[in-house]
Image (spheres, grey):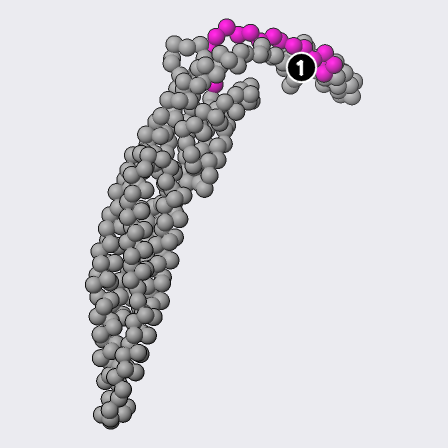
């Protein structure tokens, strides 16, 4: 199945669980697989497992992962007193009362306890295996949604690329049909010009034939047309593969553009030149679409 690199996935854990997970995945185009994970620091040890799970499902794209976590179970935290900091606050307050003796003194334990870091809550370390058990299911659900969206978008891109290949094929057929006539036109123009310059004197036909043969060899685009048709078939065949095809298609499109440029450089006919420009325009559109494929 052809996939785009653009997609979104979201999943939350079951409501009846004591642990709540919410995961959002967002992916955009990228040359390689680039995974960025944003999650609570307490879960940082699970980052490698998250990356591995994502890399098993995705091959390319810049993937941003946002994870939120809440534990609604019994609270296992312990209040810890920072005695040294509390003493420091107390001495500062006493110095203030001495300096400003005319101000009412209202130092109290509740006041000191409210100062930052005097009383801290030390939470009991959670079981990472249990957390991963719930997080993994949620992550896989979000990944499934992301992959499905990428596949739907990929199918649209596939149809669009095939349509553009058909347009190019039609133009290539027209060029192939018209190209033999270019030699005949050149021969006729050459004979007319020679007659004008020689005032109807006898001219060696073999020399004209040699000149026409040289031009025909120089202007021949048979090989380029054959290769361009081959590349068009390769694009369509590649789009049927059940694997990531973005890089392969990108290379084929470069080769298509190379052949189109060669045809343009050999063209001695305005109509063929215009058709080649239209071909290059369609190739560029395909290239832009291929950049979105995994």
* Displayed quadrant of residue 160: top left
Residue 167 screen position, x and y as percent: 24, 53
Please say if 245 is above or below 286: above
Which image quarter: residue 91? top right
Question: Which residue does the image show at 52% across and 24% down from the upper left?
Answer: 48
Residue beneath the point at 74% across and 14% down: 84
| Left or right, residue 44 beside residue 19 | right
Q: Quadrant of the N terminus?
A: top left
Q: Is residue 52 above or below residue 28?
A: above
Q: Nearer the viewer, residue 24 or 99?
A: 24
Tell me if residue 261 can be seen.
yes
* Residue position marked by numbered label 1 in the rendering: 118
Q: Quadrant of the C terminus?
A: top left
Please tell me whether mark 1 sits on a helix, a strand or a loop: loop
Question: In the depicted view, which residue is nearer to us: 212 or 231?
Answer: 212
Q: Residue at x 72, y 11 (%)?
A: 83
Q: Position of residue 288 (x, y in %)?
A: 36, 48
Which span is picked out in magenta? 69-86
Q: 157 or 93: which is nearer to us? A: 157
Q: Position of residue 100 (x, y in %)?
A: 76, 21
- Give 176 or 109, whichever is nearer the viewer: 176
* Mark 1 crowd level (few <14, some 14–19, many ≥20, 10 Å Cα): some
Q: Is residue 271 above or below residue 120?
A: below
Residue 276 visible in the picture: no
79 is within the stretch colored magenta: yes
Residue shown at 36% from the left, 63% from the top: 262
Q: Quadrant of residue 139?
A: top left
Q: Position of residue 147 (x, y in %)?
A: 35, 30
Q: Say above or below: 162 vs 64.
A: below
Instruction: Please tell me whether residue 146 belongs to the stretch shown in magenta.
Output: no
């Amino acid at each position: 199945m052809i996939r785009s690199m653009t997609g979104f996935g979201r999943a939350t854990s079951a409501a009846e669980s004591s642990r709540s997970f919410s995961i959002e995945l967002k992916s955009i185009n990228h040359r390689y697989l680039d995974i960025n994970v944003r999650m609570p620091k307490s879960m940082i040890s699970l980052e490698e497992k998250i990356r591995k799970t994502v890399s098993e499902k995705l091959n390319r794209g810049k993937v941003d992962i946002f994870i939120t976590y809440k534990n609604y179970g019994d609270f296992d935290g312990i209040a810890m007193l920072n005695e040294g900091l509390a003493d420091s606050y107390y001495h500062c307050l006493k110095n203030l009362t001495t300096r400003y003796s005319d101000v009412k003194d209202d130092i109290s334990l509740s006041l000191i306890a409210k100062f930052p870091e005097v009383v801290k809550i030390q939470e009991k370390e959670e079981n990472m295996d249990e957390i991963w058990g719930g997080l993994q299911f949620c992550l896989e659900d979000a990944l499934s949604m992301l992959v499905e969206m990428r596949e739907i978008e990929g199918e649209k891109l596939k149809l669009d690329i095939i349509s553009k290949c058909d347009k190019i094929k039609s133009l290539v057929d027209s060029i192939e049909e018209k190209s033999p006539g270019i030699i005949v036109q050149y021969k006729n123009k050459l004979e007319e010009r020679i007659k004008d310059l020689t005032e109807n004197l006898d001219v060696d036909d073999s020399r004209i034939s040699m000149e026409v043969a040289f031009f025909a060899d120089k202007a021949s685009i048979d090989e380029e047309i054959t290769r361009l048709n081959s590349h068009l078939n390769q694009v369509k065949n590649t789009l049927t593969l059940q694997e990531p095809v973005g890089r392969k298609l990108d290379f084929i499109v470069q080769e298509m553009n190379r052949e189109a440029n060669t045809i343009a450089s050999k063209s001695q006919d305005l109509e063929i030149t215009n058709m080649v420009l239209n071909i290059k325009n369609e190739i560029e559109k395909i290239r832009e679409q291929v950049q979105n494929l995994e």
